[in-house]
Image (cartoon, rainbow, N blue to C red):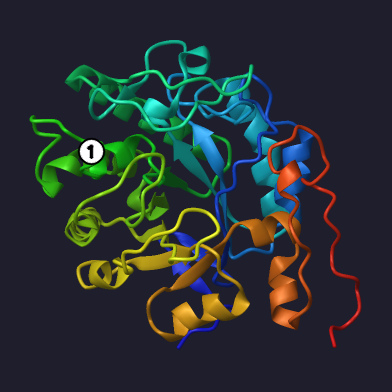
Amino acid sequence: MPDLFDPITLGDIACPNRIVMAPLTRGRADKAGVHGPLAVEYYRQRAEAGLIISEATGISREGLGWPYAPGLWSDAQVDGWKPVTEAVHQAGGRIVAQLWHMGRLVHPDLGEGQPVSASASSGPHRLHTYDGKKEPVEARAATHEDIERIIGDYVTASRNAIRAGFDGVQVHGANGYLIDQFLRDSSNHRTDDYGGSAENRARFMREIMAAIGDEIGFGRTAIRLSPIGEVNGVDDSDPEATFTTVASILEELGVPWIEMREPGQESSFVEAAHPRVSPAMRKVYSGKIGLNSDLDRGSGQALLDAGIADFAAYGRPFIANPDLVRRFRERAPLNQPDPETFYTRGPEGYIDYPQLEETPAA
């Protein structure tokens, strides 16, 4: 069976190891969604990862509901990302941009209009604004014109990602955001071609992935999913049926890899009592599958040993350990992350975690 330190090819991207940096929202861009020097250093420090998946990055003003998160819809945002991707590549790394539309989780103070979703609904939690969290606002059901426009926004953001120097894109289809609001039946109550059956609920995702693949090549196109567990008020009554349908569509399109959050019953993020659906997806999907959620070196390797995953994605361990790959290889102790600085604005808790001393591990 493969080792975490074995190379892997994900579409057009040759990765030197299977330790992937998961997407991590950090809130260090400016109000225009433009990154500066802090992000350059942050991503450069972590270039030893087999692949870096960037923090979630907005495809439009309408779809970005997180203060100080970056975007990829303007030339200024593209220019802000260019030094980041250049630094990662100069350090020997690879990086893809995660593309984000938050749907009903965008407050009008940030999205500049009523949010859109699969159906007229709102999430269960207060929404982020620059003035603190505010009560959710009911989203309107996306019209066919909205859907066509949003697909166009994904294509533009994908084109901009390549202009910015990214090696590809990962579409954020997880965690209760817009695509997930279409995919899962607790939030999709439509009666048209985008609702009802699993095939119909996955139509929006299919059209996005097809349009992006046609624009930048399917070898540079991937997706993130969260098939089990309620997140942001989004869940599914039959996740295995829904996500084997999703996997079949991705197989048909030729999408080469999927990264998924599949937590257990004791997850530190969002618990899920439902068993993994990735084994069922693997039966209909021949691409590479990576899993994420509360993994350490041993549990990540165990997923590879069992044939459940082809690579493992790590989030908080990469926040606190820019040299995580080396620490895993040498079985060295890990720094512990400080949640108080996850979303603050400065360098603290962002680029100041210590590297492992240049001495062999015991």
Three-letter residue code for mark 1: Glu
**Dot 1: what SS?**
helix
Please report the residue visible at 25 percent of the width from the left and 36 percent of the height from the top: 187
Q: Where residue 253 sits: x, y (%)?
A: 23, 53
Q: Is residue 188 above or below residue 121?
A: below
Q: Position of residue 287 (x, y in %)?
A: 32, 66
Q: Is residue 172 something that shows in the picture?
A: yes
Quadrant of the image for the N terminus? Answer: bottom left
Residue at screen point 85% across, 50% down: 352
Q: Residue at x 70, y 33 (%)?
A: 28
Query: Can you say which quadrant of the picture contains the C terminus?
Result: bottom right
Q: Residues within 10 Å of mark 1 (few under 14, many from 20)?
A: some
Asked whether, in this view, residue 105 is left or right of residue 116, the answer is: right
Q: Nearer the viewer, residue 32 or 348?
A: 348
Q: How many marks can you see?
A: 1
Please give the residue where the numbered disc 1 appears in the rendered image.
Answer: 207
> With 47 as the anchor, is 206 left or right in this view?
left
Q: Quadrant of residue 70?
A: top right
The structure residue drawn at horizontal position 36% and vertical position 54%, both measured from the top left corner, is 229
Location of residue 304 with respect to 102 vertically, above or below: below
Residue 219 in percent (x, y) is at 38, 55
Give percent across and percent down for residue 49.
Answer: 64, 63
Camera sees residue 6 = no
* Rendering quarter of residue 200: top left
| The quadrant where residue 289 appears | bottom left
